[in-house]
Amino acid sequence: MSRFRRDGDVVVVDLPSGERDMLSQVLSDLRDLLIDGGDDTLRRLKPPAHLDNGEAEASYRELVDDDLLRSRLEAIETVESTLSGAELDTSAVTAWMQSLNSLRLVLGEQLALAGVDLVNQTMPDTASAALYEWIGWLLEQLISAASESPEP
């Protein structure tokens, strides 16, 4: 069963309660990581812009980090407020995509740090790997629903 469906100009969220609870928990965990900011698993969310120039990188981080953090926290808030059967407009769909993608990037980094080979798909049978796969599946379903042409 699809967790998202197109209804005219909106995408409707249809998550079972257990999945809503799970997503709510991992979004809360992501928020905590983002606010703390020092975790290595956030690397994929903040790739360097200037690999060979520390001063330029520091200036870049000073310019963008606060806005990126604010954007990610706002996206998480949007997802949390629309978990229960809400109708998502374009901006809410974008927030969902951003949040689900951020979760996958952080989980992917956690799995890579644990020695999992994501490129060759040698996924261990762990809760983190299952969560990574499930969030990817949700993102795929959301993209599919958002990409459908609205009924005339």
Image: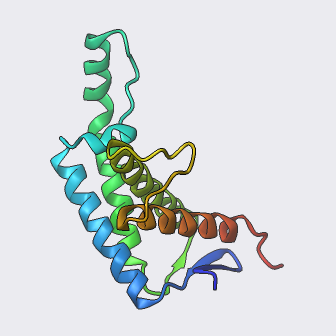
| Residue at point 39%, 39% (across, down) | 44
Report which quarter residue 6 is drawn in.
bottom right
Residue 127: give x, y in percent of width and height. Answer: 36, 68
Question: Quick one: quadrant of the N terminus?
Answer: bottom right
Tell whether 104 sits left or right of 147.
Answer: left
- Colour mode of the rendering: rainbow
Measured along the vertical axis of the image, is residue 78 above or below residue 17? Answer: above
Q: Nearer the viewer, residue 132 or 103?
A: 132
The percent coordinates of residue 7 (x first, y second) are 68, 82
In the rendering, at what x and y percent does residue 92 appear?
Answer: 50, 66
Q: Nearer the viewer, residue 126 or 77?
A: 126
Q: Residue at x 22, y 53 (%)?
A: 33
User: Which residue is depicted at the point 52% across and 51% down?
Assistant: 122
Q: Residue furthest right?
A: 152
Rendered location of residue 64, percent (x, y): 33, 33
Q: How many labels does the image show?
A: 0
Question: Measured along the vertical axis of the image, is residue 139 above or below residue 115?
Answer: below
Horizontal arrangement in the rendering, residue 139 relative to residue 72 (left or right): right
- State the image quarter where residue 145 is shown: bottom right
**From the image, which quarter does the C terminus lie in?**
bottom right
Comparing 29 with 128, the one in front is 128
Residue 128 as seen in the image, left or right of residue 146: left
